[in-house]
Image: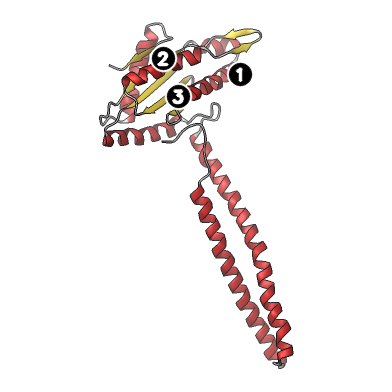
Amino acid sequence: MVSSRSHKPNSRSMIRNERDVTRKTLIVTLVSLVASWIITGTVLLLVGDLSTQALVVPVVASTVAPLLAAPPFAWRNFKLMLEVNRSHQEIERLSRTDALTQTFNRRYFMEVAGREIRQAARHGYPVSLLLIDLDRFKKINDGLGHLVGDRALIACADAIRHTVRGEDLVGRFGGDEFLVLAPHSDLSSGAELAQRLCEALASIDLVVGGQLVGIKASIGVVSSQGRGDDADLLLRQADQALYRAKALGGDRCELAA
């Protein structure tokens, strides 16, 4: 399962690049040697001096020169490929990450969640989905400004990441809503996680102008229970549970019926 905490470089791509460089180095060296020998032989034939003394120096020079020139060329090629590889990895990371909170974005979260839920259905284990909505967050934005609101969202994302397990998936659904996918977690376990998340979010110490900004959250919890549900269905059920939590005053979690 992919975690939102870190993104390791693609080692397979790195190994493939190293092999490509090794192969290209050999090809360049062999081609250079053959070309040097052909040129040297042609020049000697044109000059007409094929004595041992006349052959030794140019043949040695034409052999050593490509061997000396190929490694720097290959190293430069290797560094270029590493740079391209890093650029591709960064582009891939940005395409699946929310820029503000550094959690997964909604598109990537739902894509991975769909795969995990299908796998859970095949193997018969439950998966919990939690939809988190910050209570009265609009008051923070309107009263203290969007920069403070951004700080609050970052703090919330950090609190969620530090509360869930390493195998759990954390994403930003949009605005002030977050998603958590917890594999091998039934409805009871999902409810326990939701309670811990409520407590973690409430304990955030965000001070602005000497004033403590309190953060509360409502959470809707649903579990696949090993059934063949899809991510969209579970999301709708979690949203309905979240709506009930909001209607009951917020700062609580509700389970899907």
For the residues labelled 3 and 1, the Cα–Cα distance comes to 26 Å
Q: Point out which mark residue 196 bears.
A: none
Q: What residue type is labelled 1?
A: Leu
Disc 2: which residue: 195
Residue 223 location in percent, x, y?
31, 23
- Residue 235: which quarter of the image? top left
- Residue 234: which quarter of the image? top left
Tell whether 82 sits left or right of 5: right
Q: Which of marks 3 and 1 is in front?
A: 3
Task: Give the residue displayed 53% in from the left and 37% down from the top.
Answer: 94
> Contact, CB < 8 Å: mark 1 with mark 2?
no
Disc 3: which residue: 164
Q: Which amino acid does label 3 sit on?
A: Val
Residue 125 location in percent, x, y?
29, 31
> Contact, CB < 8 Å: mark 3 with mark 1?
no
Residue 170 location in percent, x, y?
45, 27
Residue 58 location in percent, x, y?
71, 82
Q: Point out which mark residue 147 bears.
A: 1
Q: What residue type is labelled 2?
A: Gln
Task: Give the residue displayed 63% in from the left and 54% down from the top.
Answer: 79
Which quadrant is the N terminus positioned in? Answer: top left
Q: Nearer the viewer, mark 1 or mark 2?
A: 2
Secondary structure of the residue carrying tag 1 is helix
Tell whether 59 sits left or right of 171: right
Secondary structure of the residue carrying tag 3 is loop
| Upstream in sequence: badge 3 or badge 1 | 1
